Every structure is written in structure tokens, then in C-alpha cells.
């Protein structure tokens, strides 16, 4: 008898991405707020990088929901195109 997948294993990717988004967003605001008070270039750069990480993890969480077997079409198979010259 085949085992059924664990109900929590499929949602872990989305949950981890949401938690990472919230953590990275909080860190970005923290460092950008510190930059506002101290005018430190290091805080500004760290805040920017944490903002980029937050955006990437938000994208990852969204794509985990969009790119599932239930919501995507099958793969379209394309014939190979020979570009080499025959000589």
C-alpha cells in the first residue's frame, strides 16, 4: 500500500517563505531606520540587501503556490532545432 504524503510537507515551502519574508522585511526596516538616525552607509546597504532578500522570499512563496501540479499546464515538448552547418 503506497504511503500518502504528509499533509505538512507540501506547505513547508510556503510557510518558510512567509516567515523569511517577514523576518527580512523587519530587518530591512530596522536597518533603514537606524540609517535615518545615524546616517551610516553600512546600515543603508544592509537595509537594502535585506529588502532584496525579502522581495525574493516573497516571490518564492508566491511561486510555490502557482507552480504546483494542480495549477500548471503540462510541459510542451518542442523538436530540437539543428543550427549546425552540414558540410
Image (cartoon, rainbow, N blue to C red):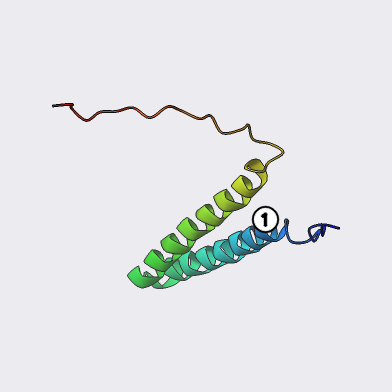
Tag 1, which secondary structure?
Answer: helix
- Estimate the x, y position of residue 21 in percent, counting from the top left: 59, 59
Query: With respect to residue 61, does 37 lie above or below?
Result: below
The crowding category of the residue bearing disc 1, from other C-alpha atoms within 10 Å (few below 14, some 14 to 19, many at least 20), is some
The one nearer the camera, 78 or 49, is: 78
Q: Identify the residue position indicated by label 1 in the image.
A: 14
- Estimate the x, y position of residue 3 in percent, counting from the top left: 82, 60
Q: Quadrant of the C terminus?
A: top left
The one nearer the camera, 47 or 70, is: 70
The reply, left or right, for residue 18 in relation to residue 53 is: right
- Estimate the x, y position of residue 86 in percent, counting from the top left: 18, 26
The reply, left or right, for residue 47 in relation to residue 86 is: right
The one nearer the camera, 44 or 37, is: 44
The reply, left or right, for residue 62 in relation to residue 4 is: left
Q: Is residue 37 visible?
A: yes
Query: With respect to residue 28, does 69 lie above or below?
Result: above
Query: With respect to residue 38, does 56 lie above or below?
Result: above
Residue drawn at x 67%, y 46% is 65
Amino acid at each position: 500500500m503506497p504511503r500518502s504524503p504528509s499533509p505538512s510537507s507540501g506547505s513547508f515551502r510556503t510557510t518558510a517563505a512567509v516567515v523569511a519574508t517577514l523576518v527580512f522585511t523587519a530587518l530591512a526596516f530596522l536597518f533603514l531606520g537606524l540609517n535615518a538616525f545615524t546616517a551610516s552607509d553600512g546600515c543603508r546597504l544592509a537595509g537594502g540587501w535585506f529588502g532584496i532578500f525579502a522581495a525574493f522570499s516573497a516571490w518564492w512563496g508566491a511561486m510555490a503556490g502557482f507552480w504546483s501540479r494542480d495549477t500548471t499546464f503540462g510541459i510542451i515538448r518542442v523538436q530540437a532545432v539543428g543550427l549546425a552547418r552540414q558540410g
